[in-house]
């Protein structure tokens, strides 16, 4: 009879251990993407989309959220893929990186070199 209780107890421990491993297992499907602002300007909007997308979608920054010069913002992507990233600064100028393969957590640094020439207003013509 003692052996029967030991066996049942052992089964219970194995089941609970397996359950706790499942519950505590990290989610490897998510990817942390850190954007560093070295553009020289405060960033007001951050857009991330699959390169195949037609539209950028909504900004990843909240209403009163900014990425100050030299600071960073980390967002979570739900899956790996080829992405485009666009920052819009306080003057509404944009900085874009296209066709980035993001398949693991990584950091992407934006500098003035990523400035979109097409975002300049032609008001002086």
Image: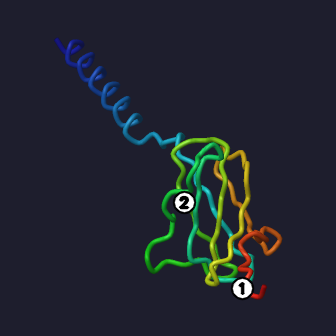
Residue 82's place in the image compared with 41, above or below, is above
Sequence-first disc among 2 and 1: 2
Q: Is residue 75 left or right of residue 109?
A: left
In which image quadrant can residue 91 be found?
bottom right
In this view, 12 is above or below 70: above
Q: Which residue is mark 2?
A: 75
Q: Quadrant of the N terminus?
A: top left
Q: Which residue is mark 1?
A: 123
Within 10 angstroms of label 1, few (less than 14), some, or many (20 or more) residues?
A: few
Residue 97, percent from left and from top? 73, 59
User: Which residue in the rendered view is the most extreme toward the front?
Assistant: 125
- At horizontal 73% and vertical 48% (from top left) the residue drawn is 99
Q: Nearer the viewer, residue 24 or 27?
A: 27
Q: Residue furthest bottom?
A: 124
Quadrant holding the C terminus: bottom right
Question: Picture coordinates of residue 19 (x, y %)?
Answer: 34, 32
User: In this view of the protein, which residue sits in the foreground, 70 or 5?
Assistant: 70
Q: In x, y percent, where is residue 56?
A: 56, 56
Query: Residue at horizontal 74%, vertical 83%?
Result: 40
Q: Secondary structure at mark 1?
A: loop
The residue lying furthest to the left in this view is 1
In which image quadrant can residue 33 be found? bottom right
């Amino acid at each position: 009879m003692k052996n029967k209780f030991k066996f049942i107890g052992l089964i219970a421990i194995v089941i609970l251990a397996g359950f706790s491993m499942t519950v505590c297992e990290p989610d490897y499907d998510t990817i942390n993407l850190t954007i560093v602002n070295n553009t020289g300007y405060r960033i007001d909007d951050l857009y991330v989309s699959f390169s195949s997308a037609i539209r950028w979608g909504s900004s990843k920054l909240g209403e009163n959220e900014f990425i100050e010069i030299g600071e960073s913002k980390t967002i979570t992507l739900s899956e790996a893929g080829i992405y485009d990233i666009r920052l819009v600064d306080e003057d509404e100028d944009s900085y874009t990186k296209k066709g980035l393969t993001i398949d693991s957590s990584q950091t992407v640094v934006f500098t003035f070199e990523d400035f979109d020439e097409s975002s300049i207003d032609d008001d002086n013509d």
